Image (spheres, rainbow, N blue to C red):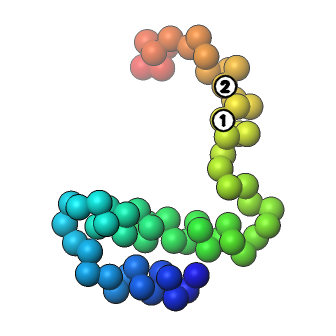
Amino acid sequence: MEEFLHWVETSPFYGKNALAKATEYTLNRANGLKLFLNDGRIEMDNNPAENAIRPNVIGRKIGSLV
């Protein structure tokens, strides 16, 4: 993983092309990815948490949030 992240950090991908966007996305989430890989208790996504709160959110009017 460290070798991959080093490669991404030193890659020559700049601008608004797809590889540059992928590079930026990867680097912005590198700490979370490392944490996920090192701690088996961490979920890959937060769908269970979102599904748990969904019944409380569905039907809420936007105006009541303002």
Quadrant where the C terminus sits is top left
Distance in Å between CA atoms under marks 1 and 2: 6 Å
Residue pictured at 70% horizontal, 20% vertical: 55
Query: Who is closer to the viewer here, 18 or 2?
Result: 18
| Label 2 crowd (10 A; few <14 / some 14-19 / many >=20) | few
Query: Who is closer to the viewer here, 61 or 38?
Result: 38
Query: Who is closer to the viewer here, 33 or 63?
Result: 33
- For residue 22, say whether it is visible: yes
The image's mark for residue 54 is: 2
Residues at marks 1 and 2 touching, judged by CB atoms closer than 8 Å: yes
The three-letter code of the residue at mark 1 reads Glu
Q: Quadrant of residue 42?
A: bottom right
SS of the residue at dot 2? helix
The three-letter code of the residue at mark 2 reads Arg
Residue pictured at 59% horizontal, 11% vertical: 59
Check the image and name the residue furthest to the right: 41
Quadrant where the N terminus sits is bottom right
Q: In the rendered view, would you say 57 is above or below 16? A: above
Query: Who is closer to the viewer here, 30 or 23?
Result: 23
Query: x, y (%) of residue 14?
Result: 22, 72
Which residue bears the numbered disc 1?
A: 50
In this picture, residue 17 sits left or right of residue 10: left
